[in-house]
Amino acid sequence: MSSNTGKHASLSAYETMDFSENSDLRKQLLARVQDEAGSAEIRLSDPLSYDSPSYLTQEMLSWYRTSVNPVRQAALTDIAEEFQALGKSNQTDGIFIERERQRLSISLGRKKRDIYREQREQKKLALDKIQSLKKEEDRLTNEYNTIRAREGNREPKVTNTPLYVFLLLIVGVVEVLINFDSFNTLSWSTPFLALGLSVVVAIALALASHWHGTVLRQWNYYFGKRERDENRWAAWRMLALGSLALSVVLASVAYARVSFLADYILLNQQLGGTDRTSSFMMIAGTLLGNVLVWIVGIFIAWLMHDRNPEFPEKRKALNKVAAQISDLSNNLERERRRELQRAEAEFADELEKLENAERAQKAASSYGAARAAFQKFSVQDGRVLAALAAYRAALIRKASKTETKLLVPHMDDETVFRSCDVSEYERHDIELKLC
């Protein structure tokens, strides 16, 4: 009995420490609240440290290291040695499963942190590009929201370019069908030349419809009282180009019809026939067909464009930047994910080996005693955690009345701390280390 007591002397010393509500140790801890609550910033300990408990404030950590850790570490060492002795019967290393499992978990977290750090160092150009694009995205978002507010919070009408080109192509095909016969009847024309002329005229008419329809749709934008002169100049330029294209189309078609009509009348006179053809209807009818196609093209341009050309352009620019950010981020994420999956697979393999070793040592005669000792140790750890939780609650109450900020270490970079309200402290679990 005395031998067993000696073996667990350190554990007994740890067990006899009083962390109850009215104990001196807890009072010593709570006495630190007032000073720490008045700090501008409260930094928490790194959860991936092997020896320091997770998410302790500096005062909590100081109290733990001076008042708890020396006795606790001695008890922990004795328990670890007791588990280590379990393997002597079969000449293997005994397994302190909780300690080894925690070490593996911390090691995995640190490996992940190293993966993020290495990527930041090796992919600096890509990461800098993402940051630059995010700034551009913020700028475009502000500009877009400004225009949207001016437009009554409506969504922009972004032109579906493939559909728009397809509809204008249909307009062009109809124009070719209308004018091919006119150019093909010219005395100096051939079918191929007539087709070429018809296609050129169709393109000119489609462009005229596009320019005229766009300006008409965006008339208030270009000619509103508050618009700039350069906007008006752009509109007048489009109107001039559209009118020139339309004039060329109508002049070409009129020329073809007039030439055909002159040849037709001359031939009819030579044959002694009586000409009852209406020159006006022949020319005007063809021109009217072209005008109708032009009007249809204007209607298509009207439907496909937004009344404010800046609105959809800002949206497209914003989407483009967002897509670039997404592509770069996804590429980096894929590379990072492969490394993380490899680290997690190694962790799973090591954990499985530990579990197998733990099952194998359960047959040892002293296994039950080692587990009982650790159970007592865990109960006392629970009392320590209760004292730390009481300090945290008192700190939150006092610090919430000030502008104190909580600095939480980032899981991907121990040198980076996230600033948050002290009330968020309860979201982070305090954990004592077994390492």
Image (spheres, grey):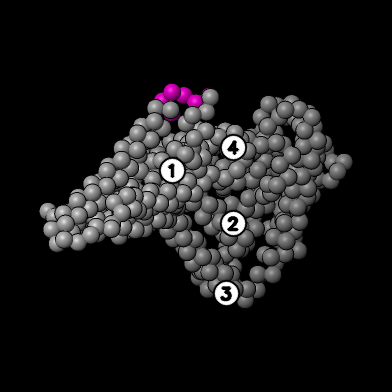
Q: Residue at x 22, y 53 (%)?
A: 261
Q: Sequence order check: which comes first, mark 4 or mark 1? A: 4
Going by the picture, which residue comes out furthest to the right? 22
Front-most of 112 and 361?
112
Which amino acid does the dot numbered 3 rest on? Ala
Which amino acid does the dot numbered 4 rest on? Glu
Q: CA distance from mark 4 to mark 1?
A: 21 Å
To which residue does mark 3 refer?
360
Q: Helix, strand, or loop for circle 2?
A: helix
To which residue does mark 1 refer?
213
The answer to if 229 sits in the magenta stretch is yes
Which label number is shown at residue 151? 4
Extent of the magenta region = 226-231
Which amino acid does the dot numbered 1 rest on? Gly
Image quadrant assignment for residue 239: top left
Q: Sequence order check: which comes first, mark 2 or mark 4? A: 2
Q: Pinpoint residue 24: horizontal percent, then vertical percent.
A: 83, 38
Q: Helix, strand, or loop for circle 1?
A: helix
Q: Is residue 128 above or below residue 329?
A: above
Q: Pinpoint residue 68: horizontal percent, then vertical percent.
A: 71, 43
* Within-10-Å neighbours for mark 1: few <14, some 14–19, many 20+: many
Q: Are marks 2 and 3 in contact (CB under 8 Å)?
A: no
Circle 4 or circle 1, nearest the eye: 1
To which residue does mark 2 refer?
102
Q: Helix, strand, or loop for circle 4?
A: loop
Q: Residue at x 43, y 23 (%)?
A: 229
